[in-house]
Amino acid sequence: NRPVVCILGRPNVGKSTLFNVLTRSKISITEDTPGVTRDRIYAKATWLDHEFALIDTGGLDPSSDEAFMPEIMAQAEVAVENAQIILFVVDGKEGLTTVDREVAAYIRKSGKEALLVVNKMDAKESEDHRYDFYELGLGEPYTISAEQSRGIGDLLDATVASF
Ligand code: GDP
Ligand code: MG
């Protein structure tokens, strides 16, 4: 069975942008299926000699009163349960938020291996937040720009190294 890689994080950090960049050019898609939304959320992928399934999820916000949040949380829970490794995406431009801390706590509770991914490092403001994320206790962050496809190779190397 191929490993499952799950992209997790609060809304608007760039999860779907990362999913798209990973499936567009850096890894080859051999199969995909539509998700419940208009967005594609699942892709079979390869990097180097490794095949894996990549899953995008809806933005997690445990304290949100948004109508679909219970469904989004439930779907993410299933994705996490099946995942070998989580790519936990945060927003370097905005810095660390309460919801990031909640999602980090959820990931720690899941016991799953996780890589901390600080996205939007192309933005000028992001430099100010570079060191904020260490306090999440998830180790050395991978700094990327999904929009500019920067840092993606190192992230994928670390991802497949965990299989
Ligand atoms: P999601 O809700 O986590 O799936 O986030 P999206 O992928 O939909 O992106 C949310 C917003 O962040 C969009 O306006 C993107 O254009 C923007 N965004 C995503 N990645 C980057 C990045 O690397 N740099 C910058 N500056 N903006 C980004
Ligand atoms: Mg998204």
Image (spheres, rainbow, N blue to C red):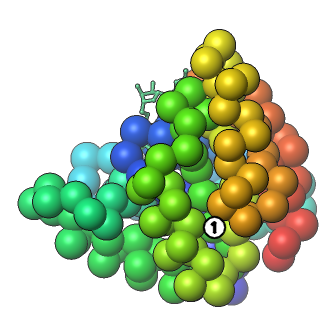
Q: Is residue 140 left or right of residue 63?
A: right
Would you identify the image quadrant in which residue 92 lies? top right
Q: Position of residue 51 (x, y in %)?
A: 75, 66
Would you identify the image quadrant in which residue 63 lies? bottom left
Q: Residue furthest left?
A: 67
Which image quarter holds the C terminus? Answer: bottom right
The residue lying at 54 percent from left, 73 percent from top is: 105
Q: Position of residue 144 (x, y in %)?
A: 72, 34
Residue for badge 1: 86
Which image quarter holds the N terminus? Answer: bottom right
- Tell which of 92 and 22 is nearer to you: 92
- Tell which of 142 and 38 is nearer to you: 142
Circle 1 residues within 10 Å: few <14, some 14–19, many ≥20: many
Would you identify the image quadrant in which residue 73 lies? bottom left
Image: 81 above or below 31: below
- Would residue 47 be visible to someone looking at this image? no
- Would residue 15 be visible to someone looking at this image? yes
Q: In this view, does 118 lie to the left or right of 33?
A: right
The residue lying at 66 percent from left, 60 percent from top is: 136
The residue lying at 83 percent from left, 54 percent from top is: 140
Q: Residue furthest top?
A: 124
